[in-house]
Image: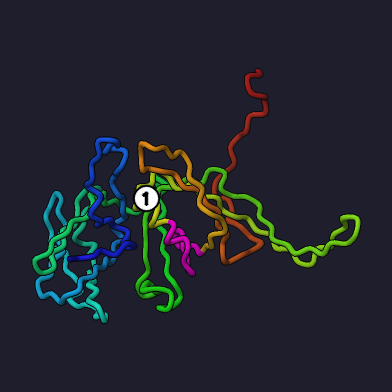
Amino acid sequence: MIYPSKYNGINFSYDFNRKSNSFNFGNQRKKLTIAISELKYISFYKSTEEEIIQLKLIGNNSTEIIGIGSFYELETGYIYFFSLLVANFASNTSGYFKLTLGTDVIYSEIIDFKSSSYLTTNEICKITAYNSDSRHGYLTETLPAFGFFKFSQLNSDFFINSKVEYEYSYGRKMILSSENNIGKRLTFLDLTMYQQNLLKWLCNTENLFIDGVKYQLISDFTELLADENSEIKDLRADFVPVEQSFFGNSSTSTPKNIFTDQFFMK
């Protein structure tokens, strides 16, 4: 049996085709969106060594994706790696992966392949994460995990303070140390169960990058707009940038006129 990595960023799990009489199938699944320029590799595990290895993209044009051609041997089996060639993908198309290892075949979910500009316009962020060394898992800097998530930055910047105080009598306090920053409160939208698990895993690693900026998770995830009839949920969490600075990003556009009248008043 082929075991796909839980952190490929692409869902190959057995349950993505499931249907239920109790749930609306359309509320349980949605298409994944990935930027073509960010496709690099995916990995799988199998207990036996295979010579017949094929990874195909099934879509408008059936294209065979060439793999690395080698594998990593473990004591219990083998990890197969596939490099994904960007030239084999076309923007604004949909498709799914079919993997053949020996006599076993597995399929991915259907994926929308988009340009990088589409992700920026539609507020879809890329999260990359890894641990510092192999003592904390297989995924290190040479083999990071990734995922793409639609998010909202509405009311995202907030003041955050961490301080140590010495308390005198009568409630008097002396600040011994104080650290101020502007944190990011991000809301990740319309996540399937696979995406929820992937997002939480990525954010709880030693190295976390959101669109290339390094952050640290400083809160638990809060579920928003969840109900019992859908697995789709919004998740909100707070982050703080690792590289702290007194300086922020400057404006590159002219200011617009702001009306001074009160609402409903003329």
Q: Does the image show residue 34?
A: yes
- Quadrant position of residue 232: top left
Task: Look at 40% across and 48% down and name the residue there.
Answer: 150
Q: Is residue 201 magenta?
A: yes
Q: Which corner quadrant holds the C terminus?
A: top right
Of residues 93 and 261, which is closer to you in this image? 93
Residue 223 falls inside the magenta stretch? no
Image quarter of residue 162? bottom right
Residue nearest the viewer, comparing 60 with 198:
198
The region drawn magenta spans 200-214
Q: Amino acid type of disc 1?
A: Leu
* Residue located beneath label 1 in the image: 119
Q: Residue furthest front?
A: 22
Give the answer, above or below, for where 18 lies relative to 43.
Answer: above
Helix, strand or loop status at disc 1: helix
55 displayed left or right of 237: left
Q: Residue at x 18, y 56 (%)?
A: 107
x, y percentage for residue 174?
84, 62
Lateral position of residue 201 relative to residue 240, left or right: left
- In the image, taking residue 253 as reference, residue 164 lies left or right, namely right
In which quarter of the view is residue 240 placed? Answer: bottom right
Q: Is residue 91 visible?
A: no
Residue at 36% in and 74% down: 138
Q: Is residue 194 left or right of residue 111?
A: right
x, y percentage for residue 220?
A: 53, 54
Decide: is 121 above or below 161. above
